[in-house]
């Protein structure tokens, strides 16, 4: 389970992500509303272990030390389609994107995965020659989440702003629900969104919903230690 407690990310002019708390357990989809792309991306980075929060905690499983929490979270989590971070580049076809992402898998999983076979097995051979960024929104989220799951160690998906590609929740919400409800692989799924879709009855949170954390937490590292963790 992902447990976020009083997580804060500080920007140049104050809190980029004000104190925020939520949980995401295996088999569930949690939607977190955040205002502005910078706020959403900062939260997605911290919730996936790619950025050490400036205060508060983000932990996967049983809490340990700050460094061990961050490493465990980074290993378990995949950050999906984050603008300016790991979204598909303009010049990449679907075929090239798949080859590039599979090449970045941990070495122990890399050799058994052939891009052409992957495209066929996962039913993307029909769009292999198209630009990845030009895919319809529902196909884009299908492709990028499926690529994230090519790493067998992934237990948590943090999807950054899936609603930025379409104003129809039907283009991305059913896919995230299906991933969370897949009985063959226990996944926790977090969608960081501009708006929680009307009628959503599942787990939800809003950035800034927590009081400032007290005591020594995950983010309460000295500046030098924090930079070392992020490296």
Image (cartoon, rainbow, N blue to C red):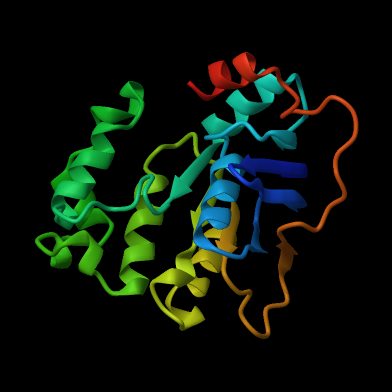
* Horizontal and vertical percent position of residue 180: 58, 59
Of 187 and 212, nearer the camera is: 212
The number of callouts visible is 0
* Horizontal and vertical percent position of residue 113: 24, 37
**Can the viewer see residue 89?**
yes
The vertical placement of 41 against 53, above or below, is below
| Residue at 80% from the left image edge and 58% from the top image edge | 209
The N terminus lies in which quarter of the figure?
top right
Of 124 and 217, nearer the camera is: 217
Q: Quadrant of residue 218?
A: top right
The vertical placement of 66 against 9, above or below, is above
Of 194 and 157, nearer the camera is: 194
| Residue at 49% from the left image edge and 34% from the top image edge | 153
| Residue at 38% from the left image edge and 45% from the top image edge | 85
Specify the farthest residue to the left.
Answer: 129
Q: Quadrant of residue 106?
A: top left
The vertical placement of 106 against 14, above or below, is above
* Horizontal and vertical percent position of residue 30: 66, 61
In screen coordinates, is 45 left or right of 15? left
| Residue at 23% from the left image edge and 27% from the top image edge | 111
**Can the viewer see residue 60?**
no
Q: Quadrant of residue 145?
A: bottom left
In screen coordinates, is 179 left or right of 138? right
* Horizontal and vertical percent position of residue 197: 61, 79
């Amino acid at each position: 389970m992902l447990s976020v407690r009083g997580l804060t990310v500080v920007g140049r002019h104050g809190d980029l992500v004000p104190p925020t708390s939520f949980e995401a357990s295996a088999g569930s989809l949690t939607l977190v509303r955040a205002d502005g792309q910078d706020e959403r991306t900062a939260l997605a980075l911290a919730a996936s272990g790619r950025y050490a929060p400036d205060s508060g905690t983000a932990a996967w499983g049983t809490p340990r030390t700050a460094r061990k929490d961050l490493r465990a979270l980074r290993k378990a989590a995949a950050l999906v389609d984050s603008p300016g971070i790991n979204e598909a580049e303009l010049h990449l076809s679907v075929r090239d994107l798949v080859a590039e992402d599979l090449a970045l898998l941990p070495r122990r999983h890399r050799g058994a995965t052939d891009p052409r076979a992957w495209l066929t097995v996962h039913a993307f051979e029909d769009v292999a020659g198209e630009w990845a960024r030009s895919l319809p929104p529902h196909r884009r989220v299908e492709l990028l989440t499926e690529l994230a799951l090519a790493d067998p160690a992934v237990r948590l998906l943090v999807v950054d702003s899936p609603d930025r590609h379409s104003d129809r929740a039907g283009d991305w919400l059913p896919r995230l629900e299906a991933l969370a409800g897949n009985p063959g692989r226990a996944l926790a799924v977090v969608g960081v969104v501009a708006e929680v879709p009307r009628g959503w009855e599942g787990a939800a949170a809003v950035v800034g919903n927590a009081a400032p954390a007290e005591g020594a937490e995950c983010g309460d590292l000295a500046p030098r230690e924090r930079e070392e963790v992020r490296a």
